[in-house]
Amino acid sequence: MSSERKLNIICWSGGKDSTATIVLAHELGIPIDLIVISLLWFDKKRRIYAEYPEVIEWIFSYAIPLFESWGYKVKVIESDKDYMHWFYHTIERTEHEDRKSKLSGWLIGGMCAMNREKINPIKRYLKSLGRNYQEYIGIAADEPKRLERVHRKGQISLLEQKGIIEEQTYDILRPYSLISPTYKFSKRGGCWFCPNQKVKEFAYLKTNHPELWAELVTFDSVPNKVSEGFKYGKTFKEISDKVDAYIANPPPVQLSLFDFIYEEM
């Protein structure tokens, strides 16, 4: 690597915006030295990722080989601790005596330790590279608040430079079959156990991955949790009942942009 320029790095989440950034760099002939992706574990010992299985399959079997065929190096960074660790973590330091010696249990939406598990390993890796790199971020042109942070950090958004809004990223990805399977059932990526998911997404999980749903059922019966709140105060049983009701009587299908993404492929 020549010292005449900085390393060009793309932080890739697997989502549409960061994937479209990789495609744009390829089409524009921008030399990319490294693509970095951070993957979370649900249970590292049993090799169960936090992402949906079909997304993991797409990442390793299709997307990464394609990027490597373009001459891009892909660095996969894995979380230090898995969901199992945090769920079974025993609380010792707390101002609330009633919580001491209990299990952390369900991780709280919006305050999830898995967020740190995803971000911190990337930060450490980038820090190990020194300051000699330029980071490209997948933020669309119609996300002004997020772009403000990009500018403050000295990062670059190719989507912003080309005036590409979120909707248009699908047009960039479709010719390369690079639309993540995530968008078949959700508008966002993330962990299959995330409490931020909607009932219909949990219904997809239970219907298509009963073995993963069974993991949550097992967790629900674990005693001595600090709280039985699974999704913003609601218990897993309450959410499970909603999921069963959704599966038994799904609402009428209302086609949206996301429904047409795969129909056209």
Image (spheres, rainbow, N blue to C red):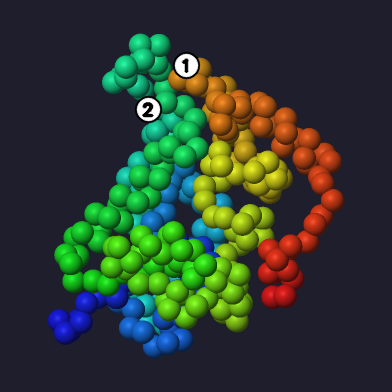
The residue under the point 37% across, 78% down is 72
| Occupied quadrant, residue 82 | top left
Q: Nearer the viewer, residue 42 or 264?
A: 264
Q: CA distance from mark 1 to mark 2?
A: 11 Å
Residue 89's disc is 2
Tell me if I can see residue 187 in this picture. yes
Query: Measured from the top left, where is residue 220 in percent x and y?
Result: 57, 26
Instruction: Read off the residue under disc 1.
Output: 224
Instruction: Tell me: residue 178, above or below residue 215.
Output: below
Q: Earlier in the sequence, mark 1 or mark 2?
A: 2
Q: Is residue 177 left or right of residue 141?
A: right
Which amino acid does the dot numbered 2 rest on?
A: His
**The C terminus - image quarter:** bottom right
Residue 173 visible here? no
Residue 171, placed above or below residue 203:
below
Residue 152 image point, x, y percent: 30, 63
